[in-house]
Amino acid sequence: MRKLKALRQMVNHQVISYKALNIVLAFGIIVVGFTASMFGQVSLTFSQVIGGLFGQETTAINIIVQELRLPRILLGGICGAVLGYAGALLQGLLRNPLADPGVIGVSASASLGAVVAIYFGLSVYSPFAVPIAAIMFALLATVVLAVIASRDTSILTLILAGVGISSIAAAGISLVMNFAPQPMTLQEMILWMMGSLENRGFNDLYLSLPFVLVGLVLVLGVGNSLNALGLGEETAQSLGVNLKRLRLRIVGGVAFSVGAMVAVAGAIGFVGLVVPHFARTMVGHEPKRVLVPSGLMGAILIMIADILTRLPFGQGQLRLGVVMGIIGAPMFLYVVLKTRSEMR
């Protein structure tokens, strides 16, 4: 009876047409993207942005639009889409609306790689030393998770492994920060961990994009399996779902893509946690249908948050991770309270 009730809820609870929602969200990304291109230390008009995109404005405006703001907007959109999509995947896999990409420990591992690179001053030799180190540590965590997922089919084991990796990485970060050779190094570590898209260019996009594409390829076609898993592991297995392979694909895909985004944008929380919940309120609880709207909503959320970081705020500048904390924490509290009320 409970499984039948869950199935009816997944299929029937839909506020808006799935296709219409995705079209509206895609249009929203374009609108927010153009809006973001107008904000910054130098404010631009809509016509200047259009002219700058096609190289028809002054040299200064062309450089601002094409080389400074365009890659930042694209990277922010991809980052948000990855985090939102990854959150929806993990919530479907773990069947827990409070799961997010941080639960598997890849984000913390990437952060550890970054602070290690900063500690040893590797950025002096290459501006990509920090993101490359972050990606390498994320891949290391991915290998560990892949080995565990291939040997054990228990979801609890996977969650505990992620918690363990996160704890080890957090301890490593604290240790490195504790032995920071000078205050400037410590400040650089802290600022990086707050997350930011400032001064990001096409080279950062090119560095992260291959890993994101690998992650996307790994999770292509898992939607139907997630739908079956939503009815229980035994039911999913009876429908022909290979649970071990499914976990391996999702964990690997999320690890590759999220690790790459953390490597270039720093630690950004709450996106993968709260965005899938709002997608469910519009398209229902079917895991497959939540994936794409979650990615689109995540892109919009990060792009809007990045706009807020460009606005003057006192004598300092807001970091993207801080803005997401301010926006995401109340959303998270709302999700917790709503989830609790639904379980009664």
Image (spheres, rainbow, N blue to C red):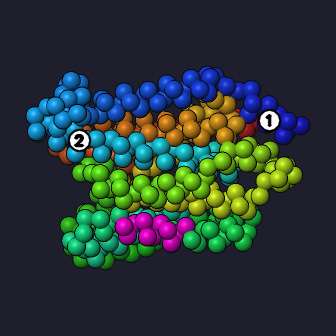
Q: Mark 2 points at which residue?
A: 66
| Residue 194 visible, this angle | no
The type of residue carrying mark 1 is: Leu
The type of residue carrying mark 2 is: Gln
Magenta span includes 113:
no
Q: Nearer the viewer, residue 167 or 284?
A: 284
Count the numbered circles shown: 2
Residue at horizontal 73 percent and vertical 38 percent from the top: 343
**The N terminus lies in quadrant:** top right
- Left or right of residue 46: residue 151: right
Q: Which of 149 and 275 is in front in this view?
A: 149
Q: Where is residue 58 in the image (x, y as percent from the top left)?
A: 10, 34
- SS category of the residue bearing label 2: helix
- SS category of the residue bearing label 1: helix
Image-quadrant location for residue 339: top right
Q: Name the residue under label 1.
A: 7
Residue at horizontal 54 percent and vertical 45 percent from the top: 85
Segment tinted magenta in the rendering: 132-142
Residue at horizontal 53 percent and vertical 56 percent from the top: 215
Image-quadrant location for residue 153: bottom right
Q: Where is residue 68 in the image (x, y as percent from the top left)?
A: 22, 45
Q: Where is residue 11 in the image (x, y as percent from the top left)?
A: 75, 30
Q: Is label 1 in contact with label 2 (beta carbons under 8 Å)?
A: no
Residue at horizontal 34 percent and vertical 33 percent from the top: 33
Q: Please rate how many residues cluster around mark 2, counting C-alpha atoms within 10 Å: few if below 14, some from 14 to 19, many from 20.
A: some
Q: Position of residue 100 (x, y in %)?
A: 56, 51
Report the predominant secondary structure element of the magenta stretch.
Answer: helix
Distance CA(mark 1)–CA(mark 2):
48 Å
- Left or right of residue 40: residue 158: right
Nearest to the eye among marks 1 and 2: give it.
2
